């Protein structure tokens, strides 16, 4: 579970009744979390520093998606990244790509 940089949203990975994993987002002023379409098979979600994007790993790729939803963007292959080092590398990669758009 991760908290947005501004402290207003939580994001977490959960499985639905069909055992499909994806990112769920919940505003802290609301009771319900909503599944973020396009994040199937997600692992290790994290917010971009500006809080506008999620980065996550899925299907051997590092991807990003706008917090409000939309189509995910594949940033790079991520099959060989170690979990601890990968999280730091992914954040740097995402920050660089977000800043370029």
Image (cartoon, rainbow, N blue to C red):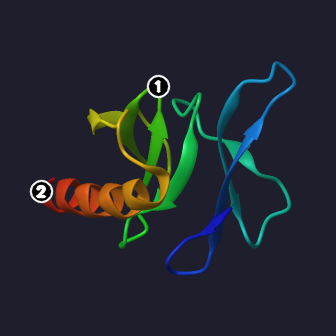
Q: Residues within 10 Å of mark 2 (few under 14, many from 20)?
A: few
20 left or right of 18 in image: left
Residue found 47% across the figure and 60% down from its top: 84
Image coords of residue 97 (percent x, y): 19, 53
Residue that sits furthest to the top in the current view: 18
Label 2 belongs to which residue? Answer: 100
Q: Secondary structure at mark 2?
A: helix
Q: Secondary structure at mark 1?
A: loop
Q: Residues within 10 Å of mark 1 (few under 14, many from 20)?
A: few
Instruction: Mark yes or no: residue 72 visible.
Output: no
Label 1 belongs to which residue? Answer: 59
Instruction: Mark yes or no: residue 65 visible.
Output: yes
Of residue 29 and residue 9, the one placed in the foreground of this image is 9
12 left or right of 16 in image: left
Image coords of residue 54 (percent x, y): 45, 53
Lower position in the chain sequence, tag 1 or tag 2: 1
Marks 1 and 2 sit apart, C-alpha to C-alpha, by 24 Å
Nearer to us of marks 1 and 2 is 1
Image coords of residue 51 (percent x, y): 43, 68
Residue found 57% across the figure and 32% down from its top: 37
């Amino acid at each position: 579970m991760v908290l947005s940089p501004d402290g207003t949203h939580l994001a977490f990975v959960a499985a639905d009744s069909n055992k499909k994993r994806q990112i769920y987002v919940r505003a802290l002023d609301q009771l319900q979390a909503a599944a973020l379409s396009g994040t199937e098979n997600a692992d290790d979600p994290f917010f971009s520093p500006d809080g506008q994007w999620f980065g996550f790993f899925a299907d051997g790729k590092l991807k990003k998606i706008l917090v409000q939803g939309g189509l995910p963007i594949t940033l790079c292959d991520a099959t060989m990244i170690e979990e601890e080092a990968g999280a730091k590398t992914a954040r740097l990669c995402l920050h660089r790509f977000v800043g370029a758009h």
